[in-house]
Amino acid sequence: MTYIRPKFRHPDLPKNDLGYTTREYEGSLSTLCAGCGHDSISGSILQACFELSIPPHRIAKLSGIGCSSKTPTYFLGNSHGFNSVHGRMPSVATGANMANRDLIYMGVSGDGDTASIGMGQFVHVIRRNLNMVYIVMNNGCYGLTKGQDSATADAGSKSKAGSVNPFQPIDLAGLALELGAGFVAQSFSGDKEQLVPLIKAAVSHPGFAFINVISPCVTFNNNPGSTKSYDYVREHIEATGKTDLVPEKSEILASYESGTGTEVMLHDGTFIKLEKLAVNRDPFNRMEAMNALRNARNRNEILTGLLYIETETEDLHHTINSADRPLNSLEEEDLCPGSAVLAEINEDLR
Amino acid sequence: MPNSKVNDFVIRFANVNGTGSASANYLFAKAIFRMGIPVTPKNIFPSNIQGLPTWYDVRVSEKGYLGRREGVDLMVCVNPQSMPDDVLSVKSGGYFIYDCTKALNPALIRPDVTYIGLPLMEMCLREFTDPRQRQLFKNIIYVGALSALLDIEFSVLEQLLAEQFVGKEKLVAMNIKALNLGIQYIHSNYAYPLDIRLERRNLVGDKILIDGNSACGLGAVYGGATVVAWYPITPSTSVVEAFESYAKKLRVDKETGKRNYAIVQAEDELAAIGMVIGANWNGARSFTATSGPGLSLMNEFLGLAYFAEIPTVLIDVQRTGPSTGMPTRTQQSDILLAAYASHGDTKQVLIFPSTPKECFDMSAESFDLAELLQTPVIIMTDLDLGMNDHMSESFEWDDKRKYNRGKVLDASQLEEMPQFGRYLDIDGDGIPYRTIPGTHPTKGSFFTRGTSRDEYAAYTEDGRVYVRNMERLLKKWNTAKETVPAPFLYQEENKSPYGIIFFGTSTFSAEEAIDSMHASGLVFDAMRLKAFPFNKTVEDFIYSHEKVFIIEQNRDAQMRSLLINELNVNPQKMIPVLNYDGMPITAYAIMALINKNLSPALNASTSKILS
């Protein structure tokens, strides 16, 4: 079967500040199953980058292995991408970021890629506060190998084949909070309205930004009894509030109702506006976020939205005091100490 | 022959790990070096922080032989744990120096060994009050005693101490006091100097004394490495430590205080190599250093870097395997694992340094090589080269030299191109053009993957396209044969039906063995390998000899297997010469094995020459 994406685009497609339409942010046609949650997330990433007017070549997409990790082919075709090995995307992203601190690093992973084989790298990339966006497309199962439970499948969740998962799930958002991530959000692939601003905020956050996105697997985990099916997620979702990202140059929108929302000023001067916060939610309190997440789980509910944000954050480059210029732009004169210095070194070794 | 033992002997120090003996022993070795006499120190240490026996061998060789030599002429034993074995390892006619504060067990007395007792503990208790000083200065006292027994120039020791403790005059004075305690004790109690002794020479020239790991770290600084990711593992740890210590001095921006490098200590070797690949993909020169267990873990990523064609530099400081093996002993046993690292059809470029100078040069050059070939380059050093000080040619750098970044397209080149294809072989050498992320808004982006792809980096499961790509990789491999360092031939024309091949740290002992065998009338042609893939010279050398001896330090003759496999030569004529007990190979072992093969009758005469 051949899919051909029509080349025609409506001439009145909206343009962003760079004069680009969403077309400049598209990738090749998805080969995932029709209705896959991952494709919606790809669409949200595309939309967020378009709305932020990011030059596509200033983003690097990185992934591991699995259905989720295939998606970087399907968005941002003008960006370099790196589909690495299973569970090891964080290390590749770390090296890439060390080489050039000026690009935006968009990491995409799955629940197998992150919570099982990649758990070691996931926790360490959080620990180092690498400046990147890390999105997990979380469907609770292994798609490419045909539906085995993953480590994020809820205990008691039923697979398509009818078996019940006996193991406790790993709560990735809870783990990210526990390990000190400075930006932790949770969302649902079917809620673009919530997801796009979250991705925009994550991109603007100058440190590690984690978004766990429940993304139903239509083929292997969308059956009754599954806690990661579209129906189940829609019925059990509980939003923390509405998030919006306000670019620096924009005025703060007047529709903002005082008393029901809050603003977070980010490093680059942009604001994240959190509207209609749920009762008792404080996005600046890590302990409170961990409690809220745990309480929601106890009620069999999925807490979505921005769970926690740190306004002051220092990424890995800051920690290790590396140069402001991207290291990949340094040349001989910056790097090579030369023969005179070498002569002194020789002398010290005689 | 009264002078036969001048500048030609082996001293072994037997110490307790963690008692500060290493710096005293180094002082001893460096003093001999400063007297212009070729010297080879080797630290034989346990995988332990404190308490286990550790030894330090110093070979002094007027002829400049730098390999290990069996047989201890003088033992300095300050470790009661190892004393029974240490007494046995002294050559007949040799000397045994010990701490006579406690009487020697009569069972340890050999009639053919001369015993020299030094009341080290007693002197330290009397002369020093601080417990740590009492322990440390024991070592300096025996260095003082040795200086009297062996004729080490006192001014040389003084100068070395002054250099070591710049600005700490009190420490210098205390060390001098300890040295004098040893000297005076010998002067009042023993005849000196011994028949084994030192005489100043001018045989060192402008050579330097440094370990291979430091040389690798410095080479990486000069080669332009900016991103270093690593996981600590013996014996490679000091490569990155050396890089860091040089970079702190040489790579910090004077105005901002910021670093023109980034070092990340990874969570494991998987992450370390992943970071290196990510950084190289993004246009920085990046490397990691590891040892056997780390190399095993890195295999998956090395396959990705091979197949996705990402420059990668890896320094493998080999140790004794398999598994955890003997972590503080040397071997050359990662060769096959490195050469074919990862599943599927993979071949990796290997580089074999044999001196600190080569560690420096090859580390610096490996970044050019990796970027030229867009593939991993693995520098195969080992514990012996990496962690021991070696007398080496001094380092050189040509200030006109520019880094060769290989086929990297910039924005204007992309503008001029009709179409960019990441895996298109435009030049016919199998090496395609690459772009660095962020180069151009609309041109030159591509998707890097470990899956099969076409010339334009698009995913494919078309077998024909896959084969085309694999064949191009083979073409690139053939290009690599002429790009990697060529082997070193010891002769312009062959003069023997027998050839000897060696590489890395087998070199010193192999050269010594060839010299000695030559003296007894056995002539060989010799070749030192510097890299894999093997070029035509390697093939010709093997084909033009009846028998070829391959000297290496592993059980399974891995280099021999690699040569047979890659060059399709007759295994019958390829004779393995192996040592794999964890200690550096010796000339004697090489001669014994070669002679055993060539003529069993020769054995007797060889052992005579050696004794």
Image: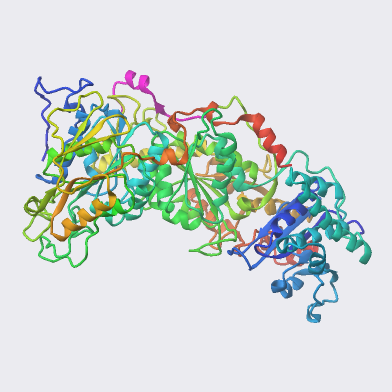
Please identify the residue farthest to the bottom as the structure is shown: B107
Q: Which residues are magenta?
A: B403-420
In the rendered image, the vertical position of residue B399 relative to residue A109, given as above or below: above
Horizontal and vertical percent for residue A339?
64, 30
**Front one among A145 and A111:** A111
Residue B594: image quadrant is bottom right
Identify whether B146 is placed above or below B228: below
- Does residue B601 appear left or right of residue A139 in this picture? right
Q: Residue at x 72, y 64 (%)?
A: B131
Q: In the picture, residue A319 is in which quadrant?
A: top left
Pinpoint residue B89: horizontal percent, then vertical percent. 74, 70
Residue farthest toward the front in the current orientation of the protein: A259
How many numbered marks are there? Answer: 0
Q: Is residue B155 visible?
A: yes
Q: Say left or right for A157 vs B270.
A: left
| Quarter of the image that includes the C terminus of chain B | bottom right
- Eyeballing the image, is B24 above or below A76? below
Q: In percent of the image, x 45 and y 35: which residue is there?
A: B371
Residue B490 pos. (x, y %): 68, 43
Question: Depth check: B441 or B562 in front?
Answer: B441
Residue drawn at the location 64% of the way across and 41% of the way down: B357
Q: Nearer the viewer, residue B310 or A138?
A: A138
Instruction: Decide whether residue B416 is among the magenta residues.
Output: yes
Q: Is residue A91 magenta?
A: no
Whole-percent x, y for residue B392 in the image: 69, 44
